[in-house]
Image (cartoon, grey):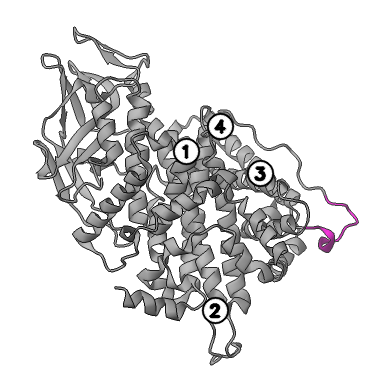
Amino acid sequence: MDAEKSVQEHLRTLVHDHSYHRIQPRLAQIFSSGILTPRPGATGADRHQLTYARLRHLTESVDARTPLLGRRDLLFPLLEWAAIADPSLFYAFFLHHCTVVGAIREFGKDQDGLEDVLADLGSTSVVGALLMTELGHGNSNAAVRTVASYDHDRREFTINTPVPEAVKYPPSVAADGIPRLGIVTARLMVDEQDCGIFCFAVPLRDTTGPRPGVRIEPHDSSPLLPLDWAAVSFDHVRIPYTHWLRDSAAISDDGTFTDPLSTPAMRSRQASRLIRYVWEGAAVGLAAITRASAAIAVRHAHVRHTNGTFAGFAPDMPVIRYRNQQRTLFGALASAYVAAMAARVIASPEPLGGTAGGIRTLFTLKAVIDQIAERVTAAGRAATGVLGFSPSNRLLEYQGLAHSFNAAGLSTQVLYLNAAWTMALGLDYEPPADDDPGRNPTATAAEWDLADPALWATLIGARERRLHQELTGELGKARENGLNEFDVWNDRFELAERTAQAHAQRLLVDIVRTATDGLPDGPTRQLAQRLCALHFLSDIHDHGGWYLTEGLLTADDIRRIPGLLNQLCDDIAPHALDLADALDVAYDVVGAPIAHADYVSAYTQAFATR
């Protein structure tokens, strides 16, 4: 038993470091409050009020007068627990504490006049919201049409929505009775001069309703992620000079605008600096719901039995014994560990970024973690049968959160295309070294260890390098043929996306190898590597045709992978529950009845307490 506990403790280090475990009791106390008891029946306005009551509880519990963005060791665990406790709460929490406070820290640093704003946000007497995207331009943060005009006589700005396409959509600000402050992106105009896109801190509503000139039209949101969506427009709303988050720009007393960034286009791109807070928070929250979904589904599969009425089904057999369930659920378990290790890199004390390569790594990891979260939450829901659709078991909520972040913070596809663009330009990027797998000419396919982590790295690195070569070669030929840049890229978006996805898998391989190599040599490391092999070998098998065409794998290698995946499942099966529990999921916070061994009694108790 002690040996098993030691293995589980070592596996937990893949998910969290020691600083997390020091604050775990504090998190348990915060999240034990009755306000956070799951209430799957809450809908509409009552649901929105509950979300913001929970936000106030969390904020008051940690004294956020000192911004949480400067306390990463506390912020990211709070985001994790909020995500598994209530995805809507997670969304509100990260918007308030990461993007809104982040905008003020990023662009209003050392500015006078923002102290009261930060104090109100720190106490949640005012709740923050982000108003970047506009109805007419989807996810584009560059085509902003909201206008902020400078009034020299009053030294103020007026925020205006000049056309219907400029309506801000869909910020979560429709709930009645809650004072709101929006970080609004708008195009600054000084004496009819376009100065680029800036952020402005704009009061949107108080306890009695929208502020003068602010129009808030409630809209329905997804039932999978209930939020108080709205369309917001402005009719010459006045805000003081101090609420302009001007960064390095300024307007002098005589009305002269100055900015070290020489063009409006350069200034407008700076607004995207804020999105890194979205990427960080999203990646951590998505990894948390991935862990929860995998752990819940694996635990339930050990106590869910078949009735044996169909051919090939044994009577009274736990479904985890079936190979199709193992491949699905152990694969989900493997991907949950991979996502957790990647999120731990993002949540490190020193943020990623500062260089083109660091920013690319951050948003590429956000994109791939979101894809993993979408896949694992869906797999967990499907593998638990009809109970997977029960709101009490949270899996649909987790799936809704994963789907939402496919679009939020730039869509996953756009992030991959941006990554490919920077890779093609060679911006702080070098393709993997040329170390294609060499095979002993006398070795048979069966003698080649496809489960060796070094081999995954070599194969996936070779895929990234060759796709990068193909992409840059195709782009070069297109330019030589005189095509403009749109046409150069337009027919190569699919290739660009595949290149970036290969880069994402290579980043994950490097992260996983580093983390698992840090485990004690022996059974624990071997178990972790065998588990992660399910994730990477499945990816290699999915692209088996490409590896075969490129001569990196033989037909015998590819035919052997399904059998190897089955063997890995056999190796993992005796340890599956330990692996699920080592994902460090707070099951009491999740509140899913099927996470319990006696899930029928857990359901009965849940119904009795409503």
Instruction: Residue 172: say if magenta.
Output: no
Q: Quadrant of the N terminus?
A: bottom right
In the rendered image, residue 141, in percent from the top left (x then y), is placed at 33, 36
- In the displayed orientation, state which residue is furthest to the bottom: 309
Residue sitting at the far right: 442
- Asked if labels 3 and 1 touch by Cβ distance under 8 angstroms, the answer is no
Coordinates of residue 202 in the picture (x, y in percent): 20, 33
* SS class, disc 3: helix
* Precedes in sequence: disc 4 or disc 1: 1
Per the image, label 4 sits on a secondary structure element best described as helix
Residue placed at 54% from the left, 39% from the top?
348
Please give the residue where the numbered disc 1 appears in the rendered image. 72
Mark 2 lies on residue: 303
Q: Which residue is mark 3?
A: 510
| Residue segment shown in magenta | 439-449
What's under tag 1, amino acid-wise? Arg
